[in-house]
Image (cartoon, rainbow, N blue to C red):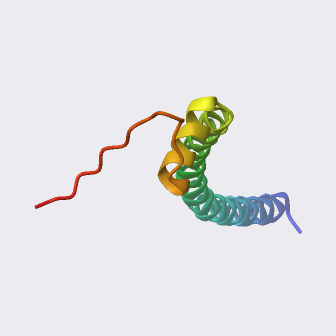
Amino acid sequence: MTARARYKRRRIQNRAGIVLASIVVLILVTVVSIKSVGLMRKVREYQAREAALTQQIEYETQRSDEIAEFERYTETRKYIEDTAKEKLGLVYPGEIIFKNTGN
């Protein structure tokens, strides 16, 4: 084999190697792009879920505060008196009750 033939053969092999490497890189870029789109979709879904859960936490915190406030109110004398008057019809001695009889 002559030097010229060997040079041509190497040149063809180099081109084939470059083409093969280019194909592999193109496939990798395509796969990474597809996976990237899927991951971005998941990120948006998780952000929406996080926002919903944050809103739910705020609601539950507010509700917990309201329950704690009601609990403190139920321990007061005023609550006991109001409940006794409304549900049991109890009054203090000498207290006069006026009822609206309606028309």
Q: How many marks?
A: 0
On the image, the x and y values in percent for residue 16 come to: 72, 66
Name the residue at 63% across, 57% down. 39
From this view, report whether residue 75 is shown above or below residue 89: above
The one of 95 and 5 positioned closer to us in this rendering: 95
In the image, taking residue 20 as reference, residue 83 lies left or right, namely left
Name the residue at 61% across, 46% down. 60
Q: Quadrant of residue 75?
A: top right
Name the residue at 66% across, 58% down. 32
The one of 57 and 29 positioned closer to us in this rendering: 57
The one of 33 and 50 positioned closer to us in this rendering: 50
| Quadrant placement of the C terminus | bottom left
Q: Quadrant of residue 28?
A: bottom right
On the image, the x and y values in percent for residue 46 come to: 61, 54
From this view, report whether residue 88 is shown above or below residue 64: below
Furthest residue in direction front, as rendered? 94
